[in-house]
Amino acid sequence: MPHRDESRSGGIDLRLLKAAVEATGEAILITTADLDEPGPRIEYANSAFTRLTGYGLGEVIGRSPRFLQGPGTDRAALDRARVSLEAGEAFQGEALNYRKDGSTYNVEWLITPVREADGRITHWVSAQRDVTARRAYEDRQALMVRELHHRVKNTLATVQAVLNATVRSSLTMPEFTQAFTGRIVSLARTHALITEDEAQVASFEGLLRAELDPYREDGRITLQGPALALPSELAVPVSMALHELTTNALRHGALAHPGGRVAVTWSVEGEPGARHLRWLWNEHDGPPPTLPTREGFGTRLLNKILTAQTAAEVDVAFDADGLRVDVRVPLGSR
């Protein structure tokens, strides 16, 4: 009778199969078939599994894979797996597991039965993949979608306020068109700054430069203050206010005069949890300031957008040397 080579199966050397399993990047477990405590028990784990979990091979053989579960593991996912396995079916799902050092990872399972010729299940083979990075990406995408939805609602409200304020402060259609177009362009520019940043914020200095950089020749404009990032809900109304101040300076204030200057200083004041941004807009050496006869130069925008949307305090003074605007915007716990 010919000798049967136990190291071969179906013409494939079992050593090659083991080498392939060891070389794969996915964690592989083979367990006994019993589902009730203390089973199933691990009979084999490849190197990818020990790298993934931090446990050595001697620390896992004979134990149930349940030892990787912890307080954050979703019980419902485990129950769904149990139902499928009791029915003798393969199961694919995800769960939160714990490494030896206590850190967590999201694992995607594919558990399949190994059967004898009579259909009896003798083992379970589990292929496991670390999907922590993918899950974090998906969660971030969902967060960004919610943020985008929120921002679109705020933007539409801002556009409506801009439209209403522009209609009330414009005497002619060309004046309305010019003012409204400038405000929408400024709004779009701010959204571009926010979108380009991974954290969805815009620096206060960046908002200033977006409005004032075209007029900074000959040292007419000075900016001084610390680095400060504003979230979108603050960046949008603040940028609109800066646009209005810049537009007014160009038409009626310091930037309408060759020798006029604009100085903007800002700081963060207050205690943690109750901080606020304070900025001072000072115009010097321009034409003598005059009180407006109607709500122009964005006064309505300052009141309806900056004050209403950020709870800011705005003090506008027409000093002998030029316009001065003192603004305090609550930052809260930011």
Image (cartoon, grey):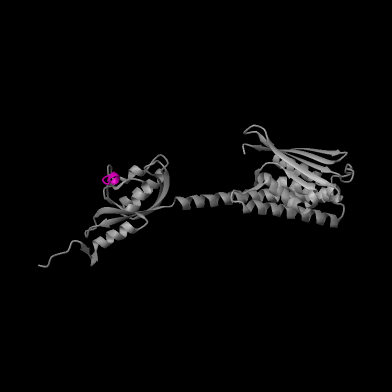
Res 181 → quadrant: bottom right
- Name the residue at 18% across, 61% down: 6
Res 276 → quadrant: top right
Q: Is residue 174 visible?
A: yes
Residue 24 in percent (x, y) is at 35, 58
Which quadrant of the rendered structure holds the C terminus? top right
Res 305 → quadrant: top right
Q: Is residue 91 left or right of residue 268?
A: left
What secondary structure do most residues of the magenta stretch adopt?
A: helix
- Name the residue at 85% across, 47% down: 260
Q: Is residue 312 left or right of residue 109?
A: right
Numbered range of the magenta stretch: 58-62
Residue 241 in percent (x, y) is at 75, 46
> In the rendered image of this protein, does residue 183 appear above or below residue 1?
above
Q: Is residue 168 visible?
A: no
- Of all residues shown, which one is farthest toward the top? 271
